[in-house]
Amino acid sequence: MEDNLLIDILNVIPAKMECYIQAPSLNNKIILDMFKKTEYDYYQLLIIDETNKNTIVNQERETSFGIYVQRIEIKKNGALLFDGFDGVEFGIVSKNLVIPEWFKEKYVPETCMISPNW
């Protein structure tokens, strides 16, 4: 199976990112146990580092938990780097993120847009 947008964006972003996830139907215990509460009613926080990035990627490959994600926002120091929607099938990536050519060829502009504003 070819890697999807969720896996590929996780492999493109650097470590130590804040990941806000809206997924009320998610039932993957491994991922749920990694969540922290936030001040937002509908979002859970996941701090992405190299260790849990590998866990998240492996869980996506094994269980496709991403289909339950309604929205995902990946930020660094409050700056939005990626905004994903609808099971992370579509998204917008920051113009400030260094995006490899292979990612652009695979996703832009059909599945993932590059934001002109942020």
Image (cartoon, grey):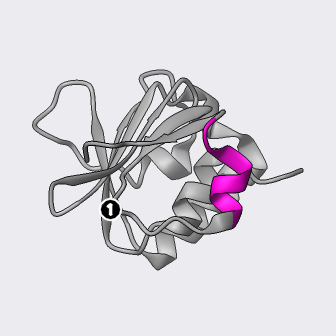
Which residue is pictured at 15% across the width and 31% down the height?
Answer: 40
- Which element is circle 1 on? loop
- Is residue 4 visible in this depiction of the protein? no
Q: Amino acid at mark 1?
A: Asn
Does residue 50 sit above or below 48 in this rendering? below
Does residue 7 sit above or below 21 in this rendering? below
In front of the other: 116 or 111 = 116
Does residue 107 sit above or below 12 in this rendering? above
In front of the other: 75 or 95 = 95
In front of the other: 51 or 16 = 16
Left or right, 43 with respect to 12, comes to: left
In front of the other: 10 or 108 = 108
- Is residue 54 visible in this depiction of the protein? yes
Does residue 45 sit above or below 47 in this rendering? above
- Residue 117 x %, y %: 25, 42
- Residue 118 x %, y %: 25, 47
Which residue is pictured at 85% across the width and 52% down the height?
Answer: 2
Total tally of numbered discs in the picture: 1
Residue 98 position by quadrant: bottom left
- Residue 82 x %, y %: 39, 48
Residue 110 position by quadrant: top right
Which residue is pictured at 50% across the width and 36% down the height?
Answer: 91
State the extent of the magenta-drawn residues as a range: 102-109
Is the magenta region chiefly helix, strand or loop? helix
Mark 1 = which residue? Answer: 96
Residue extending furthest left?
39
Left or right, 3 with respect to 116, comes to: right
Which residue is pictured at 32% across the width and 72% down the height?
Answer: 16
Left or right, 110 with respect to 31, comes to: right
> How many neighbours does mark 1 have within 10 angstroms: few (below 14), some (14-19), or many (20 or more)?
some
- Residue 84 x %, y %: 46, 36
